[in-house]
Amino acid sequence: MQPNSRKYLTTKQLPDVTGLSASFFEKGRIYGYGPQFIRIASGNRAGKILYRLEDVERWLASQEQNPKGAGNE
């Protein structure tokens, strides 16, 4: 993959990719679930949050469940 081909998403763009709400990802950052993210610091402000598309896709793939094994864990 070439450096310029990386795709970064904002929290507001994630629902279009995942079908999950932006709130889900906002809470995930607080409670420690969800895909890896990048926080770009901005002085004393919270900063901008970005997600790499490949990290989001990897996280989604890690959520895959086997229907036969569901509820048996």
Image (spheres, grey):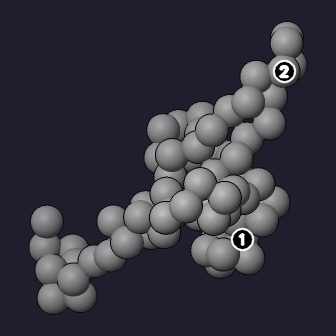
Query: Residue 15, which numbered label?
Result: 1
Q: On screen, 32 above or below 41?
A: below
The residue located at (72%, 58%) in the rendering is 9
Residue with the mark numbered 2: 42
Q: CA distance from mark 1 to mark 2?
A: 25 Å
**Residue 6 versus residue 4: which sits nearer the camera?**
4
| Nearer mark to the viewer, of 1 and 2 | 2
Q: Classify residue 44 as left or right of residue 18.
A: right
Label 1: few (<14), some or many (≥20) within 10 Å? some
Place residue 68 in its image quadrant. Answer: bottom left
Residue 49 in picture, x, y percent from top left = 73, 41
Number of callouts in the render? 2
Residue 32 visible from this viewpoint:
yes
The residue located at (73%, 30%) in the rendering is 40
Residue 28 in picture, x, y percent from top left = 57, 46
Q: Quadrant of the C terminus?
A: bottom left
Residue at the bottom extreme of this rendering: 68
Give amino acid for label 1. Answer: Pro
Secondary element at tag 1: helix
